[in-house]
Image (cartoon, rainbow, N blue to C red):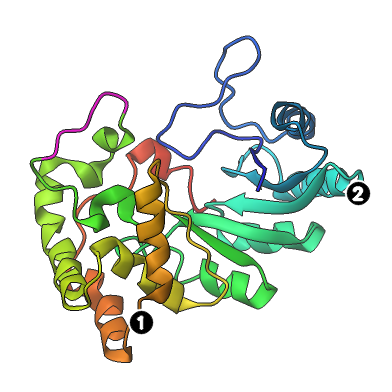
Amino acid sequence: MPRSRAPNVPPPPAPSHQEDDGAPAGLNSRPEQIRAVATASLKRLGVERLDLFYQHRVDPQVPIEDVAGTVGELVQEGKVRCFGLSEASAETIRRAHSVHAVTAVQSEYSLWTRDPEPEVLPTRAALGIGFVPFSPLGKGFLTGTVDASTSFVTGDVRANIPRFTAENREANQALVEHIATLAQAKDATPGQVALAWLLAQHPWIVPIPGTRRIARIEENTGATRLPLSADELADLNELAGRIGVQGDRYNAHHMSLVDK
């Protein structure tokens, strides 16, 4: 489904997108920037309408009502079908939705990142908004293929994430080992267990695991056929709290850009 990286930076810690002159754009959700990004995305994708247009980070300098209003105008003009937010707080979601319907909220959510549960999930459930968890496999850690001895290649964003220091990977190994034990008992992979847990939370949750390999896509879709019992779900629900998770999911700067 065609979609645009909306008026802000891509999900951190990736670099900010660039303006035409090569300078970093940073956070910029001014109405004129939203329109410029939409126009550029339509041209780049070769489509007449963007199915889902995300604001990927909330810009504190621009009222969310102005953002929602501008996207609403693009919807009326036929250039955008649906409006999405990413890593926004419950309050911001409500304010945006009051101006123009928010179709989807995208935030990091997985067995070891449970931040949306207290406020964001109940808010979007009350408003009828879909939820799209990114990094549902914990940026690969929950698949069991990453441990304290793993070396990250140049450009791998995990090299700059506190949760992925060698010390924290070693500390978090107990969590993934627990998932792997359950996976082995069910003749599945740890990644399938992590995705099956997500899919069992609510019918309106649509995780987006990233991969470049067809074999991984096939493995991931196998999660839709993996039943988890009530006891298994309850155990997984309590796992992170019981074992603990070491390290923030972003560095201090990028953590300051979420839940706004």
Queried whether the magenta region covers residue 56, the answer comes back as no
How many other residues sit within 10 Å of disc 2, few (<14), some (14-19) or many (≥20)?
Answer: few
Residue tagged 1: 227
State the residue at coordinates (79%, 32%): 35
Give the CA separation, mark 1 to mark 2: 42 Å
**Residue 76: image tag:** 2
Magenta residues (range) = 150-155
Q: Secondary structure at mark 1?
A: loop
Q: Secondary structure at mark 2?
A: helix
Residue 104 visible from this viewpoint: yes
Question: Observer-nearest residue: 204 or 107?
Answer: 204
Q: Amino acid at mark 1?
A: Pro
Q: Quadrant of residue 245?
A: bottom left
Queried whether the magenta region covers residue 151, the answer comes back as yes
Magenta residues: mostly which secondary structure?
Answer: loop
Q: Is residue 159 left or right of residue 135?
A: left
State the residue at coordinates (42%, 47%): 210
